[in-house]
Amino acid sequence: MKANHALVLIVAAVLCASTRASAAPGEAASTHATVVIPLWPKGQIPGRVSTGPERELPARGDKVIRLTDISDPAITVFKALNTDKPTPALIICPGGAYGILAYNKEGTEVAAWLNSIGITGVVLKYRVPANQDGAFQDIQRAMRIVRHQAAAWNISPDRIGVMGFSAGGHLCARLSTHADQPTYPKLDDADKEKLRPDFAILVYPAYLSQAPGKVSAGLPVSDQTPPTFLVHADDDKAYVAGSKVYHAALTAAKVSTEFFSCASGGHGHGLRSDKEVSVWPKKCQDWLIKAGLL
Protein backbone atom coordinates (compact mmCIF):
# COMPACT_ATOMS: atom_id res chain seq x y z
CA MET A 1 0.00 0.00 0.00
CA LYS A 2 1.43 3.39 -0.90
CA ALA A 3 2.20 5.75 1.93
CA ASN A 4 -0.52 8.24 1.01
CA HIS A 5 -3.22 5.55 0.81
CA ALA A 6 -2.24 4.17 4.21
CA LEU A 7 -2.28 7.68 5.60
CA VAL A 8 -5.89 8.24 4.49
CA LEU A 9 -6.94 5.19 6.49
CA ILE A 10 -5.07 6.38 9.59
CA VAL A 11 -6.54 9.89 9.36
CA ALA A 12 -10.06 8.52 8.97
CA ALA A 13 -9.66 6.26 11.99
CA VAL A 14 -8.32 9.03 14.19
CA LEU A 15 -10.92 11.59 13.18
CA CYS A 16 -13.77 9.12 13.65
CA ALA A 17 -12.49 8.37 17.15
CA SER A 18 -12.29 12.05 18.11
CA THR A 19 -14.74 14.76 19.01
CA ARG A 20 -14.11 18.49 18.96
CA ALA A 21 -14.25 20.80 21.94
CA SER A 22 -12.76 24.13 22.93
CA ALA A 23 -11.21 25.61 26.04
CA ALA A 24 -9.54 28.80 27.12
CA PRO A 25 -5.74 28.90 27.31
CA GLY A 26 -4.57 27.00 30.37
CA GLU A 27 -7.91 25.25 30.96
CA ALA A 28 -7.96 21.50 31.33
CA ALA A 29 -9.86 19.63 28.64
CA SER A 30 -10.96 16.10 27.86
CA THR A 31 -8.09 13.66 27.34
CA HIS A 32 -10.03 11.71 24.72
CA ALA A 33 -11.12 14.57 22.45
CA THR A 34 -9.63 16.60 19.68
CA VAL A 35 -9.33 19.91 21.50
CA VAL A 36 -8.94 23.32 19.85
CA ILE A 37 -7.41 25.94 22.13
CA PRO A 38 -6.71 29.60 21.27
CA LEU A 39 -3.15 30.48 22.24
CA TRP A 40 -3.81 33.94 23.60
CA PRO A 41 -6.49 35.45 25.83
CA LYS A 42 -8.84 37.63 23.83
CA GLY A 43 -7.33 41.03 23.09
CA GLN A 44 -3.91 40.06 24.46
CA ILE A 45 -2.06 38.72 21.41
CA PRO A 46 1.43 40.26 21.52
CA GLY A 47 2.99 41.70 18.41
CA ARG A 48 1.40 42.06 15.00
CA VAL A 49 -1.66 40.20 13.71
CA SER A 50 -3.19 39.88 10.27
CA THR A 51 -5.76 42.53 9.42
CA GLY A 52 -7.93 40.21 7.33
CA PRO A 53 -10.01 37.20 8.36
CA GLU A 54 -8.41 33.78 8.15
CA ARG A 55 -8.99 32.20 4.77
CA GLU A 56 -8.28 29.06 2.79
CA LEU A 57 -6.66 29.58 -0.59
CA PRO A 58 -8.30 28.06 -3.70
CA ALA A 59 -7.66 24.36 -4.18
CA ARG A 60 -4.94 23.32 -6.63
CA GLY A 61 -5.97 19.72 -7.20
CA ASP A 62 -3.38 18.33 -4.78
CA LYS A 63 -5.75 18.03 -1.80
CA VAL A 64 -3.66 20.43 0.29
CA ILE A 65 -5.46 22.85 2.61
CA ARG A 66 -3.57 26.16 2.49
CA LEU A 67 -4.46 28.65 5.21
CA THR A 68 -3.36 32.26 5.41
CA ASP A 69 -4.20 35.52 7.21
CA ILE A 70 -4.00 33.79 10.59
CA SER A 71 -5.11 36.34 13.16
CA ASP A 72 -6.25 33.93 15.91
CA PRO A 73 -3.37 31.50 16.52
CA ALA A 74 -4.42 28.20 18.07
CA ILE A 75 -3.39 24.64 18.80
CA THR A 76 -5.40 21.53 18.04
CA VAL A 77 -4.60 18.58 20.28
CA PHE A 78 -4.92 15.11 18.75
CA LYS A 79 -4.66 12.83 21.76
CA ALA A 80 -3.06 9.42 21.37
CA LEU A 81 -5.78 6.87 22.09
CA ASN A 82 -5.85 3.42 23.69
CA THR A 83 -3.04 4.07 26.12
CA ASP A 84 -3.05 4.34 29.91
CA LYS A 85 0.54 5.50 30.23
CA PRO A 86 1.59 9.13 29.68
CA THR A 87 2.59 9.65 26.06
CA PRO A 88 5.19 11.78 24.32
CA ALA A 89 3.82 14.86 22.57
CA LEU A 90 4.96 16.81 19.53
CA ILE A 91 3.96 20.34 18.60
CA ILE A 92 3.64 20.16 14.81
CA CYS A 93 4.47 23.24 12.73
CA PRO A 94 3.26 23.07 9.12
CA GLY A 95 5.32 24.79 6.45
CA GLY A 96 4.48 27.30 3.76
CA ALA A 97 7.34 29.82 3.49
CA TYR A 98 5.82 31.86 6.34
CA GLY A 99 3.13 32.86 3.85
CA ILE A 100 0.63 30.03 4.25
CA LEU A 101 0.24 26.86 6.30
CA ALA A 102 -0.05 23.50 4.50
CA TYR A 103 -2.41 22.63 7.29
CA ASN A 104 -3.44 19.09 6.46
CA LYS A 105 -0.41 17.71 4.58
CA GLU A 106 2.09 18.95 7.17
CA GLY A 107 -0.24 19.19 10.14
CA THR A 108 -3.31 17.06 10.75
CA GLU A 109 -2.11 14.14 8.63
CA VAL A 110 1.12 14.10 10.62
CA ALA A 111 -0.83 14.17 13.90
CA ALA A 112 -2.78 11.11 12.74
CA TRP A 113 0.46 9.23 12.03
CA LEU A 114 1.88 10.23 15.42
CA ASN A 115 -1.29 8.97 17.11
CA SER A 116 -0.83 5.63 15.36
CA ILE A 117 2.58 5.16 17.05
CA GLY A 118 1.46 6.35 20.49
CA ILE A 119 2.32 10.06 20.39
CA THR A 120 -0.02 12.98 21.04
CA GLY A 121 0.10 15.44 18.14
CA VAL A 122 -0.49 19.16 18.71
CA VAL A 123 -0.96 21.07 15.45
CA LEU A 124 0.11 24.71 15.71
CA LYS A 125 -1.73 27.29 13.63
CA TYR A 126 0.76 30.14 13.83
CA ARG A 127 0.59 33.65 12.41
CA VAL A 128 1.10 34.07 8.66
CA PRO A 129 1.80 35.75 6.29
CA ALA A 130 5.17 37.49 6.70
CA ASN A 131 5.18 37.47 10.49
CA GLN A 132 8.13 35.43 11.74
CA ASP A 133 8.27 37.23 15.08
CA GLY A 134 4.57 36.57 15.66
CA ALA A 135 5.04 32.92 14.69
CA PHE A 136 7.89 32.64 17.20
CA GLN A 137 5.73 34.06 19.97
CA ASP A 138 3.05 31.53 18.99
CA ILE A 139 5.35 28.50 19.26
CA GLN A 140 6.66 29.73 22.60
CA ARG A 141 3.14 30.09 23.95
CA ALA A 142 2.16 26.69 22.52
CA MET A 143 5.08 24.97 24.28
CA ARG A 144 4.12 26.53 27.59
CA ILE A 145 0.44 25.59 27.29
CA VAL A 146 1.25 21.98 26.40
CA ARG A 147 3.65 21.71 29.34
CA HIS A 148 1.05 23.27 31.64
CA GLN A 149 -1.58 20.77 30.51
CA ALA A 150 0.68 17.70 30.46
CA ALA A 151 -1.07 15.96 33.36
CA ALA A 152 -4.57 16.77 32.09
CA TRP A 153 -3.74 15.46 28.60
CA ASN A 154 -1.83 12.37 29.83
CA ILE A 155 1.45 13.67 28.37
CA SER A 156 4.86 12.81 29.76
CA PRO A 157 6.26 16.19 30.89
CA ASP A 158 9.85 15.32 29.95
CA ARG A 159 8.99 14.10 26.43
CA ILE A 160 7.47 17.19 24.79
CA GLY A 161 9.07 18.04 21.48
CA VAL A 162 8.61 20.09 18.33
CA MET A 163 8.28 18.90 14.75
CA GLY A 164 8.38 21.19 11.74
CA PHE A 165 8.25 21.05 7.97
CA SER A 166 10.04 23.56 5.71
CA ALA A 167 9.45 26.99 7.29
CA GLY A 168 7.92 25.14 10.24
CA GLY A 169 11.24 23.34 10.61
CA HIS A 170 13.01 26.68 10.80
CA LEU A 171 10.52 27.81 13.45
CA CYS A 172 11.30 24.67 15.51
CA ALA A 173 15.04 25.21 15.11
CA ARG A 174 14.60 28.79 16.28
CA LEU A 175 12.83 27.63 19.45
CA SER A 176 15.48 24.93 19.96
CA THR A 177 18.28 27.51 19.91
CA HIS A 178 16.52 30.33 21.82
CA ALA A 179 14.85 28.33 24.57
CA ASP A 180 15.81 30.79 27.31
CA GLN A 181 14.57 33.93 25.56
CA PRO A 182 10.84 34.64 26.11
CA THR A 183 9.48 37.27 23.74
CA TYR A 184 6.32 38.39 25.53
CA PRO A 185 5.32 39.25 29.12
CA LYS A 186 3.80 36.50 31.28
CA LEU A 187 0.03 36.35 30.99
CA ASP A 188 -0.95 33.47 33.29
CA ASP A 189 0.36 30.37 35.06
CA ALA A 190 1.09 28.62 31.76
CA ASP A 191 3.80 31.19 31.10
CA LYS A 192 5.77 29.95 34.10
CA GLU A 193 6.63 26.80 32.14
CA LYS A 194 9.99 26.31 30.43
CA LEU A 195 10.39 26.95 26.71
CA ARG A 196 13.06 24.41 25.76
CA PRO A 197 11.70 21.44 23.78
CA ASP A 198 12.87 18.03 25.00
CA PHE A 199 13.61 17.01 21.39
CA ALA A 200 13.10 18.25 17.84
CA ILE A 201 12.26 16.69 14.47
CA LEU A 202 13.02 18.82 11.41
CA VAL A 203 11.64 17.57 8.08
CA TYR A 204 13.10 19.29 4.99
CA PRO A 205 13.66 22.44 7.09
CA ALA A 206 14.19 25.73 5.28
CA TYR A 207 16.36 28.78 6.05
CA LEU A 208 18.90 26.98 8.26
CA SER A 209 21.92 28.39 6.41
CA GLN A 210 22.62 31.92 5.20
CA ALA A 211 25.99 31.30 3.50
CA PRO A 212 27.79 28.21 2.22
CA GLY A 213 28.86 26.07 5.16
CA LYS A 214 27.40 28.33 7.86
CA VAL A 215 24.33 28.03 10.06
CA SER A 216 22.05 31.07 9.94
CA ALA A 217 23.09 33.73 12.44
CA GLY A 218 19.69 33.54 14.10
CA LEU A 219 20.19 29.91 15.08
CA PRO A 220 22.95 29.78 17.73
CA VAL A 221 23.42 26.03 18.19
CA SER A 222 24.92 25.09 21.58
CA ASP A 223 25.16 22.13 23.92
CA GLN A 224 21.75 23.22 25.25
CA THR A 225 20.06 22.58 21.91
CA PRO A 226 17.75 19.55 22.31
CA PRO A 227 18.35 16.17 20.62
CA THR A 228 17.37 16.55 16.97
CA PHE A 229 16.36 14.27 14.09
CA LEU A 230 16.63 15.72 10.57
CA VAL A 231 15.13 14.52 7.29
CA HIS A 232 16.19 15.78 3.87
CA ALA A 233 16.49 14.54 0.29
CA ASP A 234 19.53 15.59 -1.72
CA ASP A 235 17.39 16.70 -4.66
CA ASP A 236 15.88 19.49 -2.54
CA LYS A 237 18.61 21.74 -3.88
CA ALA A 238 17.30 24.94 -2.30
CA TYR A 239 17.43 23.78 1.31
CA VAL A 240 19.35 20.53 1.85
CA ALA A 241 22.62 22.39 2.51
CA GLY A 242 21.03 24.01 5.54
CA SER A 243 20.21 20.64 7.08
CA LYS A 244 23.77 19.47 6.50
CA VAL A 245 25.39 22.44 8.24
CA TYR A 246 22.85 22.40 11.07
CA HIS A 247 23.53 18.71 11.64
CA ALA A 248 27.28 19.42 11.61
CA ALA A 249 26.81 22.21 14.15
CA LEU A 250 24.78 19.93 16.43
CA THR A 251 27.48 17.27 16.20
CA ALA A 252 30.21 19.80 16.99
CA ALA A 253 28.21 20.94 20.05
CA LYS A 254 27.92 17.28 21.15
CA VAL A 255 24.13 17.33 20.81
CA SER A 256 22.53 13.93 20.18
CA THR A 257 21.46 14.04 16.54
CA GLU A 258 20.69 11.88 13.54
CA PHE A 259 20.32 12.93 9.91
CA PHE A 260 18.31 10.75 7.54
CA SER A 261 19.35 11.77 4.05
CA CYS A 262 18.57 10.12 0.75
CA ALA A 263 18.81 10.84 -2.96
CA SER A 264 15.20 11.53 -3.97
CA GLY A 265 12.09 13.09 -2.50
CA GLY A 266 12.36 16.80 -3.15
CA HIS A 267 10.62 19.35 -0.94
CA GLY A 268 7.15 19.52 0.55
CA HIS A 269 6.22 15.83 0.44
CA GLY A 270 4.94 15.43 3.99
CA LEU A 271 3.85 11.80 4.37
CA ARG A 272 2.68 11.49 0.77
CA SER A 273 5.89 10.65 -1.08
CA ASP A 274 6.47 7.52 -3.15
CA LYS A 275 10.15 8.46 -3.59
CA GLU A 276 13.12 7.20 -1.61
CA VAL A 277 12.38 9.65 1.20
CA SER A 278 9.04 7.91 1.90
CA VAL A 279 10.68 5.72 4.57
CA TRP A 280 11.44 8.72 6.78
CA PRO A 281 8.56 8.08 9.26
CA LYS A 282 9.95 4.62 10.09
CA LYS A 283 13.46 6.04 10.44
CA CYS A 284 12.08 8.74 12.73
CA GLN A 285 10.18 6.20 14.84
CA ASP A 286 13.34 4.11 15.17
CA TRP A 287 15.26 7.18 16.37
CA LEU A 288 12.59 8.01 18.93
CA ILE A 289 12.77 4.48 20.31
CA LYS A 290 16.57 4.47 20.36
CA ALA A 291 16.59 7.84 22.16
CA GLY A 292 14.21 6.55 24.83
CA LEU A 293 11.49 8.97 23.80
CA LEU A 294 8.96 6.38 22.60
Image (tube, rainbow, N blue to C red):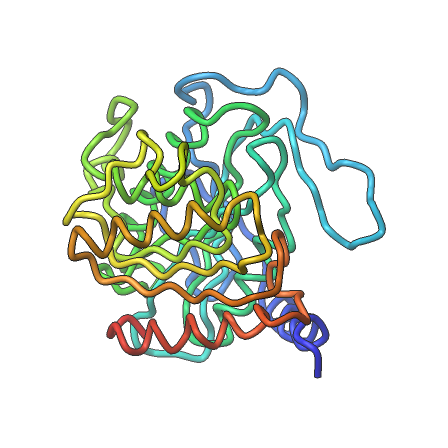
Question: Is residue 158 shown above or below 71?
Answer: below
In this view, the residue farthest toward the bottom is 1
Could you tell me which quadrant the N terminus lies in?
Answer: bottom right
Tell me where residue 57 appears, x and y as whole percent.
76, 36
Tell me where residue 248 appears, x and y as whole percent.
29, 53
> Would you identify the image quadrant in which residue 161 lies?
bottom left
> Would you identify the image quadrant in which residue 5 lies?
bottom right
Could you tell me which quadrant the C terminus lies in?
Answer: bottom left
Question: Is residue 229 shown above or below 123?
Answer: below
- In terms of depth relative to the viewer, which is nearer, 241 or 182? 241
- In terms of depth relative to the viewer, which is nearer, 17 or 164? 164
Tell me where residue 170 appears, x and y as whole percent.
43, 41
- In terms of depth relative to the viewer, which is nearer, 43 or 288? 288
| Residue under the image location 31 percent in, 63 percent down | 155
Is residue 38 rendered to the left or right of residue 196? Answer: right
Q: Number of marks in the image?
A: 0
In this view, the residue farthest toward the right is 61
- In terms of depth relative to the viewer, which is nearer, 254 or 86? 254
Is residue 242 rendered to the left or right of residue 146? Answer: right
| Residue under the image location 33 percent in, 69 percent down | 87
Is residue 127 rendered to the left or right of residue 158? Answer: right
Question: Is residue 138 shown above or below 46?
Answer: below
Question: Is residue 126 shown above or below 228?
Answer: above
| Residue under the image location 62 percent in, 56 percent down | 266
Tell me where residue 20 appears, x and y as whole percent.
58, 55
| Residue under the image location 47 percent in, 52 percent down | 92
